[in-house]
Image (cartoon, rainbow, N blue to C red):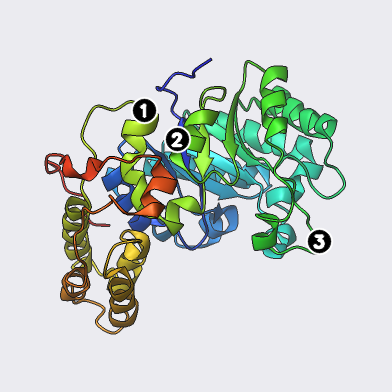
Amino acid sequence: MIQKADSPWRFCIAPMLDWTDSHYRVLARLMTRRARLYTEMVTTGALLHGDVARHLRFNAAEHPVALQLGGSDPAALAHSAHLGETYGYDEINLNVGCPSDRVQNGSFGACLMATPEVVAEGVRTMREAVAIPVTVKTRIGIDRSDSFEEFSRFIETVAGQGGCEVFIIHARKAWLDGLSPKQNREIPPLRRDFVYRIREEFPELTFILNGKLETLPEMANELHTLPGVMVGRAAYQHIDWLRYVDQTLFADTRPVIARADVLSHYLDYIEQNISAGHSLHSMTKPLLTLVNGLPGARQFRRHLSEQAPKRSSDTDVVREAIAFLGDLESTESDELHWRLTGLKTDLNSRRVPLLRNKPDGG
């Protein structure tokens, strides 16, 4: 059965530490109007004791955007969720999937799978504190507790006692000792069958699949049986393919935005934010993989990486980098383009109108 294209979670970009900051999300939004975006994980401690505005400010162009929280104390989670709603986020997501030592030392992340009642209580208090959706991003298990029956009990507890209705499932278990976060994204085997089975067991709940989804054809295939997918590394390693998401996964009839237009709009955004005090380097980082596969891409990346930190308020750095590129719209012989999108035709020749409202600063 083909799933409806109007699910809010049909296509999501995962929360990724040191990557999915506000600048990245603005760039992603220039390419896809339909994706659901997620912040980097923000801990409850950072919001209780740190600079709330620095952690929660985001650009109005990013909607729909979800705030991912890391924490386990119900009162702190409720307070942090309320702050997120006040700042205008569209969803609060609880991290129950990160296996890093730092996160474990704070008693949150993937280690919470061992205490589903704690997760349920946190979800319940957040749901009572906000009117927006509260969701959970989790693994399928941890360490030796990796049977489907244990995973099912976790879902049953968090849904039944906490009221969670939407689960984003990274379809791997996590080893809490002995593997790095990077290894935990690669070594434990993918078990997508757990996600298919749990959806059959709890048809009233929404389950979103996450884990090594790399191409649009693969995502489209999963969307025949699941209401949504979440993509991680592929969405920053080769960010350009996000231009094709709306047409491929949502049957959007609007033309694919051209790379030249993406760069033009994003340069406008950079110029606005330079005057607001943002560093050039932080804003050019998301651009590094936009032109993968194009002639001059290596020089483009090198120039941005070398010059943006030195000339922190000089937007000519971006224009100089663009000058290294050849045909911005070329895809006909681009094997990477074909592998990621499954599209042989050059959709880039179809332009979209300029956005009426350019992204705001801040």
Which one is nearer the viewer's eye here, 57 or 294?
A: 294
Give the alpha-carbon distance from disc 3 to disc 1, as whole Å: 40 Å
- The C terminus is located in which quarter? bottom left
Q: Which mark is residue 177?
A: 3
Q: Residue at x 43, y 56 (%)?
A: 236
Task: Answer with mark 3 or mark 1, whichever residue precedes in sequence.
Answer: 3
Farthest residue, direction bottom: 310
Amino acid type of the residue tagged 1 in the rendering: Phe
N-term mark: 3 or 2: 2
Please tell me which of labels 1 and 2 falls first in the chain. Answer: 2
The residue to which callout 1 is attached is 250
Label pair 3/2, CB-CB below 8 angstroms:
no
How far apart are the alpha carbons under marks 1 and 2? 9 Å
Which residue corresponds to the image point at 45% horizontal and 58% vertical from the top-left?
Answer: 237
Question: Looking at this rendering, what residue extends furthest in the right direction?
Answer: 144
- Residue 328 lies, in percent from the top left, at 21, 58
Q: Which residue is mark 2?
A: 11
In contact (CB < 8 Å): disc 1 and disc 2 = yes
Give the position of the N terminus as an image quadrant: top right
Q: Residues within 10 Å of mark 3 (few under 14, many from 20)?
A: few
Q: Position of residue 196 (x, y in %)?
A: 67, 26
Kind of residue sitting beneath label 3: Asp
Q: Secondary structure at mark 2?
A: strand
Q: Nearer the viewer, residue 27 or 197?
A: 197
Give the side of residue 309 with respect to residue 184, left or right.
left
Q: Quadrant of residue 125?
A: top right
**Mark 3 or mark 2, which is nearer to you?**
2
- Label 3: element kind: loop
Q: Secondary structure at mark 1?
A: loop
Of discs 3 and 1, which sits in the foreground? Answer: 1
Percent position of residue 316, x then y = 15, 74
* Amino acid, disc 2: Phe
